[in-house]
Image (tube, rainbow, N blue to C red):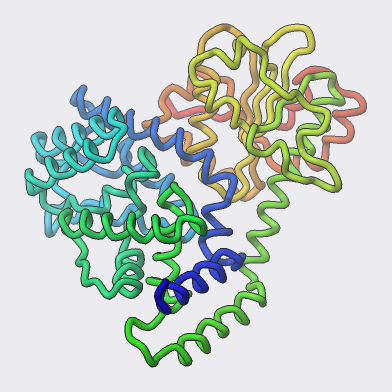
Amino acid sequence: MTDRALLIRQLIEQWREDEGATYQSWFLWDERLKNFRSIRRGIQQVVSEIEAGTFGVAYRGSSLETVVHSIAEQRQIFKGADHAFLWKPKLRIPDIYESPKNQRAFGRLLDNCVCCDNAEDVIAHIRTIDAHKIKGLGPAVANLLYFLHPTLISPFNTAIVNGYNALTGSKVKLGSWEQFLAMRGGILDLNDEYRDLLSNDLGAIGGLLFDIGSGRYPAPPLADGGEGDWFARLEAVRSEAAKLSKAQQAQGESERTHTEMQAWLRDLGLALGYRVWIAANDRGRLFGDSPLGTGCLDHLPGEIAAAPGADAVRLIDVLWLEQETPKVAAAFEVEHSTSIYSGIVRMLDLALSGGGFHAAAGLFLVAPDDREKDVRAQIARPAFSRISDLDISYLPYGELETHRDQIARFGSGLKAIRAIARPLEQAI
């Protein structure tokens, strides 16, 4: 192993331990995994609308805006992911809105990549779209493809390119699919070399390159002689990371509050006599001295587990189920600071999954009092036109906190919960 390889290994080890770097703050973030299925479903909706000729000629209000916005909401690594898809009228790019031919080619790329499962096919489809020379449609699309194939395609933005160039001494340029594919090959080589510290999911190395390219971490010197200065800069990063910023403290509180809401809903459901399901990837999370899943179902009833959309239903934050039947009485998605989009999609998966086990279920988006505007704005998107057919409500934290003890002592069924929630429906 070369001296520089040892320096890179030291960099990655420190980066992994930094609570404010992307490895801990995004890659290991439980909510990240919940977003994959909902974003995949959103991409499939984009494809369906393009195939049906109903996508339209504008980004604003489109199903593409909905899914890209949900990506852009996922912490710092995807901040600004929507910029590449915004219509620039003076340049008339990206040319997938006004040109039906280009729009269909874009839809075929997404559709083909949804269906394929190996790197060769994905690369072939990328080369096909590149051959169309669609103005303004470049490698930023890789952020969509990452959520379809996280082990084949890495996230992409300016900071990631800058980080890759700094770490490898390359001169990759933005805007070119050929340059992107060359960088992808280099990223895979790096990932293989340091796989024991990274992941098969290329989001991990994408996060490392992002933190280097955005200036949080310095890349080791490319030539001998600069190690002393680099070590000093790395130590400065360590010292700074040890002092949690106000923003990081706020994020920690955000995660605690999300868990706390799940615990409140768990305890309330049990007090009302329901069986309770906690999201599969949250069951082991501690609240107080015990896991969230304490006293809850270990498995979903077979009828639910076998239904279409079951993988998404398993990730709904809290479900209340009837005692004697497999029917869902209520479903709750806690949306403290995460994308409301993913929670709505999981609710739709439950409501549209068939089988009759959800027919009378109350669906609740649980969010801070000051997020009502955000919740209603998402519900109003054309992509969620079917919401008006569902019994879905907004449940503010404040109302839940104020009334939960009384509901637990004197309530029965969902009547009291419905009384403190606010119905959501699209304007007709």
212 lies above or below 222: above
**Whole-percent x, y for residue 324 in the image:** 78, 7
**Residue at (68, 22) in percent of width and height:** 330
Q: Quadrant of residue 170?
A: bottom left
- Specify the quadrant that holds the C terminus: top left
Q: Is residue 64 left or right of residue 341?
A: left
Seen as rendered, the residue at the extreme front is 1
Q: Where's residue 54, x and y in %? A: 22, 27
- Taking the image as shown, residue 103 lies to the left or right of residue 165, namely left
| Closest to the observer, 243 or 169 | 169
Place of residue 160 in the rendered image (x, y in percent of width and height, measured from the top left): 35, 64
Res 125 quadrant in image: top left
Assign the N terminus to one quadrant of the image: bottom left
Left or right of residue 91: residue 358 = right
Quarter-of-image position of residue 4: bottom left
**Residue displayed at 66% across by 54% down:** 254
Task: In this rendered view, identify the residue nearer to me: 165 or 1.
Answer: 1
Q: Residue furthest right?
A: 409
Quick one: 47 or 24, which is closer to the camera?
24
For the point 89% across and 32% down, the residue is: 406
Q: Residue at x 33, y 29 (%)?
A: 44
